[in-house]
Amino acid sequence: MLTVTSRHKISAAHRLYAYDGKCEHLHGHNYLIEITLAAEQTDALGMVMDFSTIKECLLAELDKLWDHRTLLYDQDPLCRPLQDILHDTSVCAVPFNPTAENMATFLGSQFFPKLLAAKGFSQRLSIQRITVFETENNSATWHNHDQTSR
């Protein structure tokens, strides 16, 4: 198996709903998202996936979804009122409490696999690992334990 890894930065705000601590307050991070793709064989050019294709097909979609947004759990009582007040797409309701762990799991198990399938890459490639760095010292990693899903 061969892998390639690409890193991408996004800026986003969030808060942890029902959390007792500093992270219950709305605050922001400059996240570093690391995506690792795996393939049994390279393509005709000798690549798992061209890095520019990763950027254009996967990471650009991540920017549209989360970059410069406020990520709030859809059950958070602040989510709907903020969306109503702002009347724009800056508040993104997510179906999970926006911890680094949940973000990595969502990206690795749902978001990126759907993009790979939509672009016709899912037969040859799989997401092996997603790491979400909330700070340079703190990260969470989702690992694909179902490599047969390609």
Image (cartoon, grey):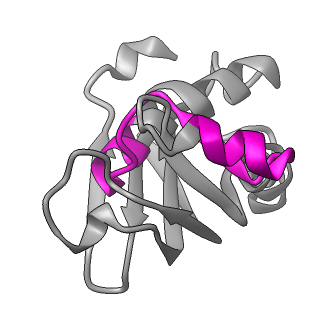
Q: Is 83 positioned to the left or the right of 150 in the image?
A: right
Q: Does the segment drawn in magenta span residue 93? A: yes
Furthest-left residue in view?
Answer: 20
Depicted 52 relative to depicted 56: above or below: below
Residue at 78% over, 58% down: 55
Residues in magenta, as a range:
80-105
Residue 44 in picture, x, y percent from top left: 80, 39
Which of the 4 quarters of the picture holds residue 133?
bottom left
Quadrant location, the N terminus: top left
Residue 61 in picture, x, y percent from top left: 78, 45
Depicted 119 relative to depicted 46: above or below: above
Q: Is 124 positioned to the left or the right of 108 in the image?
A: right
Furthest-bottom residue in view?
Answer: 136
Q: Is 138 positioned to the left or the right of 132 in the image?
A: left
Depicted 87 relative to depicted 145: above or below: below
Which one is nearer the viewer's eye here, 2 or 130?
130
Count of picture labels = 0
Q: Does the segment drawn in magenta span residue 82? A: yes
Residue at 13% over, 59% down: 20
Which one is nearer the viewer's eye here, 1 or 34?
34
Residue at 34% over, 42% down: 102
Residue 17 in picture, x, y percent from top left: 31, 47
